[in-house]
């Protein structure tokens, strides 16, 4: 069994890739374990600390070969609000429950959860189900909603300050 030496970028090592791992959300967080590639390559993982694998990552093995990491699409809920303040309120409620959320300027995305979906509906949110690779690029990753709330509040404050400055000049 080949062992993982380190995580590298798959774009820089595509020529040496011997196999591909297709991982779901739970499998992407790992420190120790055994994985099997699409072509049957047995891979042992014993890393010094836990990691979160993302689309575009690759695992360098002890023989110098590379195994690409591909993230499997997962079911998600896309949440839209009436305005930025409403979106901040929805994000706050999710953050209060420590729910991982993907943040966009006009919407939130999370994994399906019947109880949370009912709560969001009661708060006036609009939701849509989809199947996507969630937070798989390095620019949009799943974060705890408390960070989402901070981001949305900063955006809202910036908009408010812009409006105040514009109205003072008139």
Image (cartoon, grey):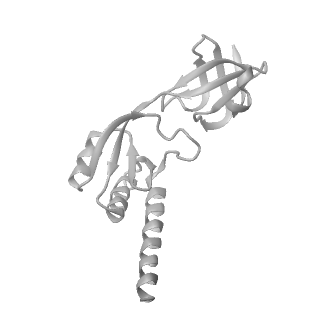
In this view, the residue farthest toward the left is 122
Q: Is residue 127 left or right of residue 88?
A: left
Residue 113 x %, y %? 31, 40
Q: Residue 124 in the image: state x and y as whole percent.
A: 23, 55
Q: 44 or 107, which lies in front?
A: 107
Q: Residue at x 30, y 41 (%)?
A: 128
Question: Residue extending furthest top?
Answer: 40
The quarter holding residue 1 reads top right
* Quadrant position of the C terminus in the picture: bottom left
Classify 146 as above or below 30: below
Q: Quadrant of residue 110?
A: top left
Q: Residue at x 34, y 65 (%)?
A: 85
Residue sitting at the far front: 170
Left or right: 47, with 120 as reference point: right
**Residue 160: x percent and y percent?**
41, 75
Which residue does the image show at 71% across and 16% down from the upper left?
2
Number of marks in the rendered image = 0
User: Whole-percent x and y of residue 109?
Assistant: 39, 45
Residue 45 located left or right of residue 151: right
Q: Is residue 73 rendered to the left or right of residue 50?
A: left
Closer to us: 46 or 119: 119
């Amino acid at each position: 069994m080949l062992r993982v030496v380190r995580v590298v970028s798959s774009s820089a090592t595509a020529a040496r890739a011997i196999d591909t791992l297709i991982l779901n959300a739970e499998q992407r967080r790992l420190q120790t374990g055994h994985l099997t590639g699409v072509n049957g390559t047995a891979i042992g993982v014993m890393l010094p600390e836990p990691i979160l694998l993302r689309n575009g990552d690759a695992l360098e093995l002890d023989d110098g070969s590379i195994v690409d990491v591909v993230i499997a699409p997962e079911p998600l809920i896309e949440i839209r609000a009436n305005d930025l303040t409403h979106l901040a309120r929805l994000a706050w409620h999710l953050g209060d429950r420590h729910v991982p959320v993907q943040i966009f300027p006009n919407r939130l995305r999370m994994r399906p959860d019947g109880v949370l979906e009912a709560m969001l509906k009661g708060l006036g949110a609009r939701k849509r189900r989809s199947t996507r690779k969630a937070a798989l690029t390095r620019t949009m990753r799943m974060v705890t909603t408390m960070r989402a709330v901070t981001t949305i509040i900063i955006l809202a404050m910036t908009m408010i300050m812009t409006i105040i400055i514009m109205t003072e000049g008139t």
